[in-house]
């Protein structure tokens, strides 16, 4: 069959295609995906074993989806990543979004919180509440989730180095609401390796950081069984400039390191694998993104079965959250971002995501306003309820191009994984700068292509126009920092300092041993120790990570 098709294709090219091209040449430039995979003029069917490569939804290798009904059962979780200024203001935004039909809460923390400093720390000056909500104590966390029933919503928290401490605060807030830890559903990002690679909000060196992650794995397995203990993130790798193939490859390389670390600590793969989740970006190359998600499920299933000998089906299912591409948004002609986000969201749905955040049109230059975030949420709702895209499972399966591109992405990702395996794994590849350099080179080449107009960005390097920015802008009140300092001063004045000192000393001793630190974090936040005090104690014991300088 393939031979006959090849012969027929050559005849088509000779008799039908060539005469037209001579008269009407094709567009100039190369036809490639963002990962440099050649895009054929027309795709033909390839010989493949359907069950081995594609299969049925809900069955190994999960190319077509992790559930047998997918969106015919229920839609993906619609989350809008949000958080700014104070816990009270962020709580109002969450309740607004829930009232608008959002089905999960997704928390953005400010930069001081992300790197373990309290709002009154001198190093926090100028950054409090700017890129997320400021959380320093259990009281802030209580305000953040005021009147939000934690047994009824799924919560995602984008926090990494101090993730275990923020999870401890969440567990204590739920307990105060009368909600047991076993009823909590959600995800904590908790992915430190990509911080060393692409994002930079690290605190501790890699080895103690990995210890915190496996402590969370172990604790949640016993006490918070419905919680996703890590969201292994390709999103930030992609936003730093990687290609789609590199996004998957480096994410899975990190995931392998986490699984190996957990196994080394004595955990069985099937005891924790079902609580692992992933977080990917979705950029503008519509068909490549769909194929990327399909390939990702298949790669992970095979890794878990063949490399880690997972026995349970749920250990092989890759569940992931998707966020549309923040770095694809433009300050020029910001309304165009609505179109970009719509295409990206649709490709995530066609690719089978379990959870989705749609960026707001104004994010290239401001925190999202209520109007902008409502449009972003409505984008998901229109896709879900009006487009028909969610009515059948994996609707582009069988497309010759999609299937061939899925195979090509899988092959390219596996080549990267093999190369890093030869180096000695993720930690070695990060320490010697290999992964960082690969991402930097891709980002550089992409920027060069934009400047040469080989990559087109509508409104930026083509179809430009003179315009005035007249969108509403959300700004954080500069007085916030002073009020936060006053709040923390009052907390330190009224709490029992002897109790706090004793808890922090106990934590320091435990950090020098190999005991699980999660129960101690819970004790510390109940005793009103702050995030900065807890992380500061660990800094004294473990030190801080200093990135290498490459020549």
Image (tube, rainbow, N blue to C red):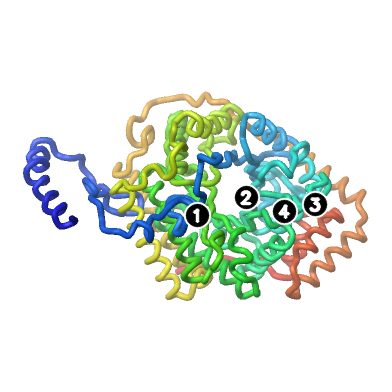
> Residue at 67% across / 55% down in the picture?
115
How far apart marks 4 and 1 lie (CA) works out to 22 Å
Tell me the quadrant of the picture where the N terminus can be found: bottom left
Q: Of marks 3 and 4, which one's residue comes earlier in the chain?
A: 4
Sequence-wise, the earlier of marks 2 and 3 is: 2
Q: Can the viewer see residue 290 in this picture?
A: yes
Residue 75 is situated, as x and y percent measured from the top left of the image, at 54, 39
Vertical order, 243 against 384 (above or below): below
Within the image, what quadrant is residue 285 found in? top left
67 up-or-down from 426: above or below:
above
Instruction: Give the CA distance from mark 3 to mark 4.
Output: 10 Å
Q: In which quarter of the image is residue 497?
A: bottom right
Q: Mark 1 points at which residue?
A: 234
Label 1 Cα neighbours within 10 Å, binned few <14 / some 14-19 / many ≥20: many
Q: Do the residues labelled 2 and 3 touch (CB within 8 Å)?
A: no
Looking at the image, which residue is at 80% across and 67% down?
507
Q: Residue 166 carries which label?
A: 4
Which one is in front, 345 or 181?
181
Q: Earlier in the sequence, mark 3 or mark 1?
A: 3
């Amino acid at each position: 069959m393939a031979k006959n098709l090849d012969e027929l294709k050559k005849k088509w090219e000779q008799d039908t295609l060539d005469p037209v091209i001579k008269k009407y040449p094709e567009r100039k430039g190369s036809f490639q995906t963002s990962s440099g995979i050649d895009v054929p003029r027309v795709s033909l069917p390839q010989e493949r074993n359907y069950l081995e490569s594609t299969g049925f939804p809900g069955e190994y290798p999960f190319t077509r989806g992790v559930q047998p009904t997918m969106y015919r059962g229920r839609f993906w979780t619609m989350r809008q990543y949000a958080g700014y200024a104070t816990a009270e203001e962020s709580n109002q935004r969450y309740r607004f979004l829930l009232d608008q039909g959002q089905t999960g809460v997704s928390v953005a923390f400010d930069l001081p919180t992300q790197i373990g400093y309290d709002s009154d720390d001198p190093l926090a000056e100028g950054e409090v509440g700017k890129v997320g909500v400021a959380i320093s104590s259990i009281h802030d966390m209580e305000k953040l989730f005021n009147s939000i029933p934690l047994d009824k919503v799924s919560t995602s928290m984008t926090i990494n180095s101090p993730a275990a401490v923020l999870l401890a605060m969440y567990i204590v807030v739920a307990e105060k609401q009368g909600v047991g830890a076993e009823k909590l559903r959600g995800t904590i990002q908790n992915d430190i390796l990509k911080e060393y690679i692409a994002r930079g909000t690290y605190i501790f060196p890699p080895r103690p950081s990995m210890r915190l992650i496996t402590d969370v794995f172990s604790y949640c397995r016993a006490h918070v069984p419905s919680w996703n203990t890590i969201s292994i993130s390709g999103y930030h790798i992609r936003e730093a400039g990687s290609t789609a193939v590199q996004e998957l490859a480096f994410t899975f390389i990190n995931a392998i390191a986490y699984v190996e670390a957990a196994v080394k600590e004595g955990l069985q793969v099937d005891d924790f694998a079902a609580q692992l989740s992933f977080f990917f970006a979705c950029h503008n190359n519509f068909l490549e993104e769909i194929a990327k998600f399909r390939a990702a499920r298949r790669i992970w299933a095979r890794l878990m079965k063949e490399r880690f000998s997972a026995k349970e089906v749920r250990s092989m299912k890759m569940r992931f959250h998707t966020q549309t591409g923040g770095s694809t948004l433009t300050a020029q002609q910001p309304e165009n971002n609505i179109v970009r986000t719509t295409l990206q969201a649709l490709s995530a749905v066609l690719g089978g995501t379990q959870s989705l955040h749609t960026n707001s049109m104004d994010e290239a230059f401001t925190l999202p306003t209520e109007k902008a975030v409502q449009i972003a949420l409505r984008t998901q709702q229109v896709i879900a309820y009006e487009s028909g895209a969610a009515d059948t499972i994996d609707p582009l399966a069988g497309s010759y191009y999609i299937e061939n591109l899925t195979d090509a992405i899988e092959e390219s990702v596996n080549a990267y994984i093999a190369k890093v395996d030869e180096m000695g794994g993720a930690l070695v590849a990060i320490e010697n700068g290999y992964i960082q350099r690969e991402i930097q080179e891709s980002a550089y080449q992409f920027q060069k292509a934009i400047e040469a107009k080989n990559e087109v960005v509508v409104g930026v390097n083509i179809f430009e126009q003179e315009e005035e920015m007249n969108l509403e802008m959300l700004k954080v009140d500069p007085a916030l920092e002073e009020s936060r300092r006053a709040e923390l001063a009052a907390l330190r004045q009224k709490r029992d300092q002897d109790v706090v000192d004793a808890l922090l000393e106990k934590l320091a001793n435990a950090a020098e041993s190999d005991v699980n630190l999660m129960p101690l974090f819970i004790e510390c936040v109940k005793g009103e120790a702050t995030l900065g005090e807890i992380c500061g104690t660990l800094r004294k014991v473990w030190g801080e990570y200093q990135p290498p300088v490459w020549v």
